[in-house]
Image (spheres, rainbow, N blue to C red):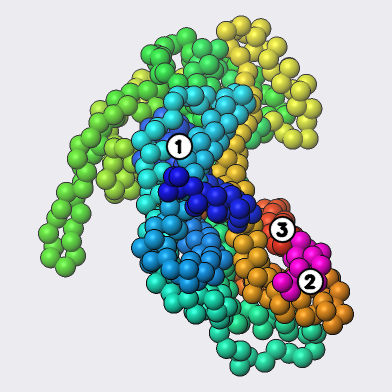
Amino acid sequence: MSETFFPINDLLRRKLQTSLTIISLTLCVASTLFLLLFSEKIGFGISLMVEGKLTSSFSSVFSRFIIFVSFLVFTVGALIMSFMIFLMISQRVRDIGLMKAAGCTNDLIFGYFMTELLIVTFISCGLGVVLGITADFFFAGLLNTLGFQVLQEPPNFWIALLVFALYFVLALILGAKPVLDSAKLEPVKAFSPTHYLGLSRESGFEVFSKLGFAPKVAMRNLFRRKSGTFQIIVCLTTIFILVTVSIAGGIIANQTTKDWVEKAVGRDVVLIAQKDMINQYELSLAKFHEVKEDSHFDYSDEKYSIPEDILSILNSTEEITDIDERLVLKTHVEEIQTYRIIPETGATIPVGDDREGESLIIGIEPGKALNNWFLEGKLLHEDQSFEAMIGDSLAQKMFSTPLIQGIRLFDTDFAVIGICLDPIENGNVTYVPLKTLQEITGKPKPNGVMIKIDPSANRTQILSQIKNEIGSINFEFEVLELNEVLDKNLGFLSYIWSSIMFLPLFALASASLCLIGYVMLAIAEQRQEFGVLRAVGAKPKTIIKIVLWQNFLVLLSSCAIGISSGVIITLMILVSKPLVTIYATIEITGWLLIALVILFILGVYPAVRFAKKPILEIIA
């Protein structure tokens, strides 16, 4: 007969306990693998990629978020593994006592339970890898269905193998010590509830008498089981930190990053330009959410210049409140090296490395731009001709300390005064004063005009009027509302954050299993006590009420620490200058309350199942 037959048969005999352990470990592995695979597929993650989709700053926000959440997921996984192994061994110590009383050696017992641990760990890690890959394919397919280009390439099996090996080894390390300690127990200690349930003396803490019978009993039991209570509180606290960071952080970061994009592009802004120029501008904005091949486009062609008649029509239309003329070009740019003085020594050190690259150059009239960028530094000024504001991706790729350096374009040097977050050309953009750009390039006419229409006017009618008048002057010039491409970029951000917020489902499921396992262990210790209560006339609802109070106190302690810590981490570390609205606060509060209620309700199941048993079965 196989040496693994008895351990397998033993695991099958304890279906509920085995299922809880396997499912909880599976969810830990799956959540970690999904996070790594999906983040890499989107273009941000542990590799800190800045090329492709998203600008450098947006990639940095996502990468920082992913790295921290990955750390939390792994920490939660380790704690859940440790706690579930603790539960598994705690429920088996009496069996170990029987085996030792029957003459089994320590080595035989250790090998027996290590075989069980190996089986459970292997199955859990294998199922976790399958579930993680499935979740990755599901969300990538969902994004493709919604119109966002995500490559459905084969999963990185090296990452899957790494996660499998990491959790497998971790489970064995965490499980080997308690198994070994239990195998060395003397039979007398193994049969003692005081030992195998980790009971301690009554606490000197006086429970307020007016709380009633159920809360007093619940409080007493929690203090008696200090070891198990401490472990479940630490485990649930870490899970609540993960859930809070995923939910609160996801909602706040989603609103914050969407606000950055909306202000950079402009809401209800209308672009007027030659039709090829309009297509190219749309392409430049779309690079934020999908990888686009950069075809050669000659921005300097005279056919793209805005005719004076069109400008006259726009200036004479009363319903147009703002007009933003622009000259868009693309050229080779160079980093200008500078020097920094060390105050203590007076020595100078070079800053920069004369790097080169390509950048979209946009000439704007300072003070008239319809954008309201989130930026570091300051905006362009009317009285400063040779100043530039650069995109965040260009700043990271080409400059060491941008705000004390300069940029050279069209053989002219500009001082960099600001770094803006702008999705156009994926952050590889440079803004300079329009008049200065016209002078150094010899291009006197703009090749694009952005306008805003008075909100009180009939927008549809005004747009139709403008289109007809422009078409009568030159049919190659068109009108484009930027809201559509703006909404596409905002939608991409929403779906990415939503996929990250999928992680709390794994965490909550694991937390539920941990709480159920803890309640089962607590009920096992209180079996005779509850049996006596039932024998003297207590109703099943009294037992349920005691367990409910125990669950409430454990969850209250865990969520108070976990939620407050998660909010602090989100606001102070993960998101720069977060945008927190009343709606976001209500939404976060609602989701966290739902999570708490779900955990509380699921924790009742073992108590209801136990309370319905006959008195004789409870006492036996």
Q: Quadrant of the C terminus?
A: bottom right
User: Which of the two residues, 120 or 293, is positioned nearer the viewer here?
Assistant: 120
Q: Does residue 54 show up magenta in the picture?
A: no
Circle 2 SS class:
helix
Dot 3, crowdedness within 10 Å: few (<14), some or many (≥20)? some
Amino acid type at mark 1:
Leu
Circle 1 SS class:
helix
Q: Which residue does the image show at 61% across and 53% down from the upper left?
A: 13
Q: Which numbered tag is attached to residue 602?
A: 3
* Residue 66 visible: no
Q: Which numbered tag is attached to residue 616?
A: 2
The disc, 1 or 3, on the residue closer to the chain's N-terminal end is: 1
Residue 435: x, y in percent? Answer: 42, 30
Q: Which residue does the image show at 23% across and 35% down from the upper left?
A: 355
Q: Main secondary structure of the magenta part?
A: helix
Q: Quadrant of the N terminus?
A: top left
Residue 347 image-quadrant placement: bottom left
- Cα gap from disc 2 to disc 1, whole angstroms: 53 Å
Circle 3 SS class:
helix
Task: Indicate which label's residue lies in the foreground, 2 or 1.
Answer: 2
Residue 260: x, y in percent? Answer: 54, 43
The residue that mark 1 highlights is 37
- Cα gap from disc 2 to disc 3, whole angstroms: 26 Å
User: Which of the two residues, 265 or 131, is positioned nearer the viewer here?
Assistant: 131
